[in-house]
Amino acid sequence: MYVVIVGGGRLGTSIAASLAGGGHEAFLLDRDSARVAAFRSEMGGIAGVGDGTSLRNLTEAGVSRASVVVAATGSDEDNLAVCQLAKWNFDVPKTIALVHRPENVELFETCGVDVVVSVPEIIMSSLATSLPAHPLIKMMRMHDRGLEVVGLKIPAGAEVAGKLLREIQLPYGSTVALIVNKEGRAEPPRADTRLEGEEVVLALSPVAFTQALWEMLTELH
């Protein structure tokens, strides 16, 4: 199966790497040349620089022969455009879109996106099933790289609450990929993002350092 993933953030690269590791042919498309180079170097995957809302770039990515197109950028607007172009212009059998704002789910479904994945809802529902004493969810394992995607909730009164992300020295190899605030809105993290209690963090972590990451983000004053 040939799958095109648009969006080379942590989620997009994790999806692409997992598909490739499962024996599928996956192509990652992203506007950022540095992200594309990193994916090729670190994951050994096939990727190209381009805009998923460009017909020419989608053509160059081979969308016309894709069985599935996954729109995994940080923009709901771009993700919807990618899916619509894939359906209308390339007749792709299945489109999958990540939605960062829950209020957009109905719009995506109305516009014909086959599978709509609400990132905040998945994270929150996963955390709801976890034990309060250990609010850590291991969501995806990348066996060939020794990495895993984890979700955790920062408790009220945590040591990191109120700090900027750039002020926090995360364990080796760990990266915060997405933050879901208390209202359920997902935002990509920036250096000046301030962490708050009761927020949900989605992170990519080396397996050996996941426990240290959890301890750092959940330690209380």
Image: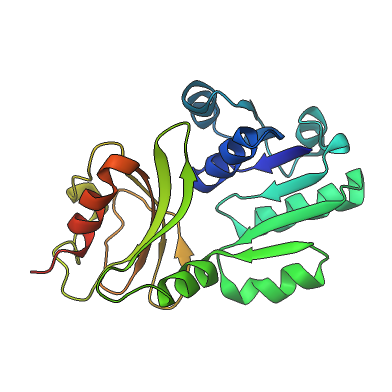
Q: Nearer the viewer, residue 172 or 37?
A: 172
Q: Is residue 194 left or right of residue 70?
A: left
- Residue 81: x and y in percent read 75, 54
Residue at x-position 83% and y-position 49%: 85
> Measured along the vertical axis of the image, is residue 120 above or below residue 202?
below
Residue at x-position 82% and y-position 53%: 94
- Residue 59: x and y in percent read 83, 32
Q: Which image quarter holds the N terminus?
A: top right
Q: Is residue 112 left or right of residue 130?
A: right
- Residue 74: x and y in percent read 55, 53
Colour treatment of the image: rainbow
Q: Of all residues shown, which one is farthest toward the left? A: 221
Q: Is residue 158 left or right of residue 210?
A: left
Q: How many marks?
A: 0
Q: Which image quarter holds the C terminus?
A: bottom left
> Measured along the vertical axis of the image, is residue 37 above or below residue 216?
above
- Residue 113: x and y in percent read 78, 62
Q: Nearer the viewer, residue 90 or 14?
A: 14
> Measured along the vertical axis of the image, is residue 15 above or below residue 31?
below
